[in-house]
Amino acid sequence: MKEILVKDVINICNGKLFYGNENETLGNFVRDTREIKEGDTYIAFKGEHNDGNIYYEEALKNGARVCILQKNSVENIIKKEEIEEKYKIASIILVEDTIKALQQVASYKRSLYDIQVVGITGSVGKTSTKDIIASVMAKKFKVLKTLGNLNSQIGMPFTMLGLKDHNAAVIEMGMNQEGEISNLTKIARPNVAVITNVGTAHIGNLGSRENILKAKLEILEGLQENGTLVINNDNDMLHNWYEANKDNNFKIVTFGIENKSDIMPYDINLREDGSTYKIDIDGKTYNVNISVGGNHFVLNSLCAIAIGRLFNIKMEDILDGIANFELTKRRMQVEKNKDGITIINDCYNANYDSMKAAIEYLGKINANKKVAVLGGMLELGEFSKNLHEKVGEEVVKNNIDILIAVGELAKDIANKAINEGMSKEKIYTCENNSEAIETIRKIAKSGDAILLKASNGLNFQEIFNEICK
């Protein structure tokens, strides 16, 4: 493990040692005082409604050895004499901006390690692709991977600061605005960059899919010399970009099902509990087994094969990593409750592309009734009505038996489904999660399948927790 000292942070961030020992070693970085353990480093952030900097004393009481605080939040309230009297072994660093400081320290930590890094971005599928790639990489390396979906301007640097004795990392990079991937990729400095697709997530902020493509391609700004870009060649935006840029001065590896690609499957067999296909590699035919259903997981596994081959992992190990990977919770999490109802929990987040994939999955499984419980998709701006209506079209196209539309935005899904020919008697509109839970309890029977899908802000996990009881 490469140690970072207080004096390193001061130098990197142009910070000031308010109190303590500049040779103190920084422990695990924590942002929540309730999670602090003895010897941890507390880094505070100023939010819209709460300022974590003012809880520095609580952090020290709970065992923090070092605190990194934003100067303008505490300069008028923190007293050196009180700190010296109560917390003699503590060190406190003041910086101008703790988010920037976090990113600078994470970048420094990355620079201490000569490791293989895979950086992943895309409109949808980042987390599940990360999970399957990390499972394959773990066959050869000790892998650090992004926990959950901590892929933001704060979450991703926290992941990098988790580097210890790892010799590889699989890092997810998310964004809401132009320039954010550029910042993250320069911290991670990947050897391999992956773009899963370009869809409509955050189109309300970026204005067009062309701008989303541009933002995703920022990942190349941190790609190391002689690095490789891996892309989904079935995605229309990436395919067109590839055709125009395949003679670039960096290596591009493609995977796909429809368009001719470097990594392609055949004899695909999609099942509700998983999928199988064949693939020819170096003159040999291999059978690939995936434990999660859905066409999009076939694409994820193809990406993992491409990554495994780039790092010279044996094909047998790649196949084992794909067959046994564990999916992050709330992403196509399939469970059966005590009443014999299958529940597909895909409620962490939602945009049109992930909605479409989830509805297609529901449409293909065997069930007495197929029930789609759908909420709104956020951050779509002027495109919101049109994209919610397109979800309604998918509900009808995939022969979903019952639609439960939850919340104001989902009414556009319901109205479009009616316009496309779905009977009003098969559609329930609910104002909130409580109404949705009651509706599900009234109509769902043993042998049915229920999909839960909405943006994270609608807290559909509440519905899942209730109907799984």
Image: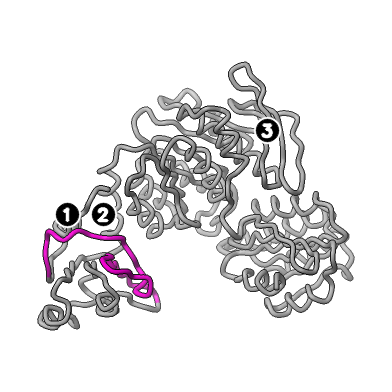
Please report whichever mark, 3 or 2, sits nearer to the chain's N-terminal start.
2
Residue drawn 23% across the image and 67% down it: 68
Query: To which residue does mark 3 refer?
Result: 257
Query: To which residue does mark 2 refer?
Result: 105
Q: Give the range drawn in magenta.
A: 20-48
Q: Nearer the viewer, residue 304 or 273?
A: 273
Q: Residues within 10 Å of mark 3 (few under 14, many from 20)?
A: some
Q: Residues within 10 Å of mark 2 (few under 14, many from 20)?
A: many
Q: In this view, does 192 lie to the left or right of 401?
A: left
Query: To which residue does mark 1 refer?
Result: 8
Q: What element carries label 2?
A: helix
Amino acid on which the number 2 mark rests in the picture: Val
Q: How crowded is mark 1: few (under 14 residues within 10 Å), some or many (20 or more)?
A: some
Q: Is mark 3 on a helix, strand or loop?
A: loop
Q: Which quadrant is home to the C terminus?
A: bottom right
**Where in the figure is residue 189, as x and y percent of width and height?**
35, 41
Q: Is residue 133 left or right of residue 38?
A: right
One can see residue 252 in this view: no
